[in-house]
Image (tube, grey):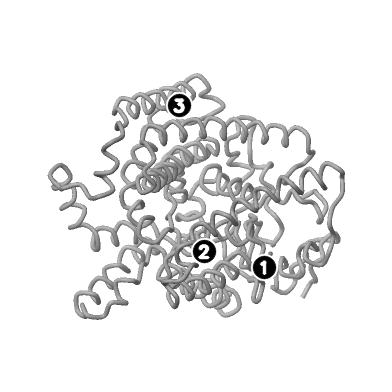
Amino acid sequence: MKGLGLGAFTLDWSTVSSFLFSPLISPFFATVNIFFGYVFFVYLITPVAYWGFNLYNAKTFPIFSSNLFMSNGSNYDIPSIVNSQFELDKDAYNQNGKVNLSIFFALSYGFNFATIAATITHVGLFYGKEIYRRFKASQKEKPDIHTKLMEKYDDIPAWWFYSLMALSVSVSLLLCTVLKREVQLPWWGLLFACGMAFIFTLPISIITATTNQTPGLNVITEYAMGLIMPGYPIANVCFKVYGYMSMSQAVAFLSDFKLGHYMKIPPKSMFLVQFVGTIVAGTVNIGTAWWLLGSIKDICSDSLPPDSPWTCPGDRVFFDASVIWGLVGPRRIFGPAGNYGALNWFFLIGAAGPVFVYALHRMFPNQRWIPLINLPVLLGATANMPPATAVNYNSWLFIGTIFNFFVFRYRKKWWTRYNYILSAALDAGVAFMGVLLYFSLTMENKSIDWWGTAGEHCPLASCPTARGVDLGPDSVCPVF
């Protein structure tokens, strides 16, 4: 869980599908791209940067961690650099020194930079002409059989979409103006976030439609707002959510409508179900979060015992990102005042990569495997790490490869027809089992303990390897 996970594996479906979704429905060429991107980054680039070059004093810190560190290897004292207004205390920050990242965490940001740049270039080169042609023919093109069958249903009135968008933007603007001190995000920041989501939705939707993998806007939105408003972590978080999640939910909305289109579900029913589902899910989620935060002391804190279930890896990454991009700001980490300015070259590398692939495709048009090299997927393969760990990827790749082999080898057999149903059944099984375990064990204060639930089997993976680094008497890490 805290190392490179060489050989780590599980058949727990909740672990397999938690970050990359179901491996059963991923196209095999996308799975291959993820495999090469994952192996290249985790088992080649990271070890070479850590043990080979000691890049950015990497050995002073763990090789794989989402924590923020002082230059001496200890965890960064974040509360000490935050003032009463939840803004950066510059004097305290200068006294504590620069923020340091684990080599894996730092390089993962570089690969995120490359991914978003590669997405724009890849879509422009490989799909630009098709987008333009389809846009021109959108009003003249003859409907296919699915569209003809759907014509018997009433279409969704356009004013439903416009009204919902106007209501959402109005409430958000009201939130930014009335709760200005708490939210920190100015009204123009909200509109800027909506504009970024609007611009990136089309290219990212194309990547999603062809590969079943969705590049995220989380890093580029954080970067943009961090440059504009450094020192305001809450504003940065809100900007990221409005920019990234608006795009992500739009892609999910389109995906659901595509499924409903092929299943011949009335469009109005799909719209209403999604609307009601969003209201219910949002209410339940925030209610549960409010209850957990109020009932569990020090939830997600380092002070909890090692066997605590409240490790909150995703929330920790989200929090640390608010510190990196919002509180401290990218200029002090990825700019001249920081340690990681060279990672900005990844933007250029990502933008140039698809140009090279496209040139090879034009030079060797008969080689069908060349256009299957999808750099937004390959470079962004490990975008979920951290909080995802190697065990998630090892299991996902293994199961995805096995199922794709059977689908390819026996494409007329039953597993081809029922592949999506099996995937949905496994997802539903996890949900039902979660409810069953809660009522049968958790509510009775009982648990099942065995070697598979023993937690981290390699505690030293969280330790630095540089000589003379002493993390104190309470640390399990040896001093080399």
Screen quadrant of the N terminus: bottom right
Horizontally, is 282 left or right of 176 in the view? right
Is the residue 43 above or below the residue 296 in the image?
below
Residue shown at the point (22%, 73%) measured from the top left: 359
Query: What residue occupies the far top of the structure in this picture?
Result: 178
Q: Secondary structure at mark 2?
A: helix
**Three-letter amino acid code at the position of disc 2:** Pro
The reply to whether residue 100 is visible in this rendering is: no
Horizontally, is 187 left or right of 464 in the view? left
Among numbered discs 3 and 2, the one appearing first in the sequence: 2
Residue shown at the point (80%, 49%) measured from the top left: 304
Location of residue 10 in the rendering, given as x and y in whole percent from the top left corner:
67, 68
Horizontally, is 83 left or right of 439 in the view? left
Question: For mark 2, does the 10 Å Cα neighbourhood hold few (<14), some (14 to 19), or many (20 or more) residues?
Answer: many
Question: For mark 3, does the 10 Å Cα neighbourhood hold few (<14), some (14 to 19), or many (20 or more) residues?
Answer: some
Labelled disc at residue 10: 1
